[in-house]
Amino acid sequence: MAINVIKPILKAIPGQDQRRLRLNIHLPLAAKRFNPSVPAHITNVSTGGAFLETVPEREGRIIDITFSFPDDPRIFSVTARVTWISQGEQQPPGFGIRFLRFHSGSATDLQEIISEFCRIEKHRRQKENFHVLDKPEVPGHQNIDAVIEGYWDKFLR
């Protein structure tokens, strides 16, 4: 499982006003109960729903999916409603879903994971944009670069 791009965004979804922290990701579904022979990936997720890159489904259809994140033992099994369809003009083909019920995992667990990934990405970007020739070492304190690199290696590589 690879995470290609991780960033917090405010995204306008057709017909909805969702202002949640979202995670852009490339995450294969562990299980699904629609088009079982067609692969599907989550490419954008928030605590309220996700975008699934796959063959579009009928708007309004109720689906069940299961997914998890790399290096995290929590498994999310949810029932969701297809809320909008993309035929692949402005973005890849697939559909947006709204989570209706968590059977395993929870919205709180999902928010923790999204927040952690976004916090790590924020630190990584700050590190890239912050150039100091002489970094003072503080006795008894761990170097922040080492901490950020450790999280980066664990969650994002």
Image (cartoon, helix red, strand yellow):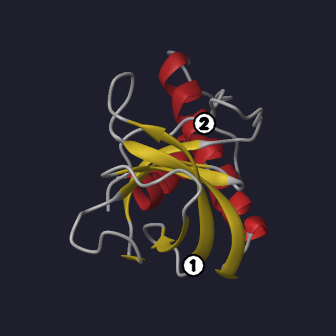
Q: How crowded is mark 1: few (under 14 residues within 10 Å), some or many (20 or more)?
A: many
Residue 77 disc label:
1
Q: In this view, does 88 lie above or below 148?
A: above
Q: Which of marks 2 and 1 is in front?
A: 1
Residue at 35%, 34% in the rendered image: 87
In the picture, measured across the screen, residue 7 lies left or right of residue 12, that is: left
Question: x and y percent of residue 128 in the render?
Answer: 48, 23
Question: x and y percent of residue 68 in the render?
Answer: 48, 72
Which residue lies most toward the left here? 37
- Spatial CA span between label 2 and label 1: 30 Å
The answer to whether mark 2 and mark 1 are in CB contact below 8 A is: no
In the picture, measured across the screen, residue 49 lies left or right of residue 132, that is: right
Instruction: Indicate the amino acid at tag 2.
Output: His
Q: Is residue 6 above or below residue 102?
A: above
Question: x and y percent of residue 108 in the render?
Answer: 78, 67
Q: Residues within 10 Å of mark 2 (few under 14, many from 20)?
A: some
Question: x and y percent of residue 136 in the render?
Answer: 63, 29
Is residue 69 visible to the viewer in this orientation of the structure?
Answer: yes
Asked which secondary structure carries label 1, the reply is: strand
**Nearer to us in this view, 142 or 23:** 23
Asked which secondary structure carries label 2, the reply is: helix
Residue 123 disc label:
2
Residue 138 disc label:
none
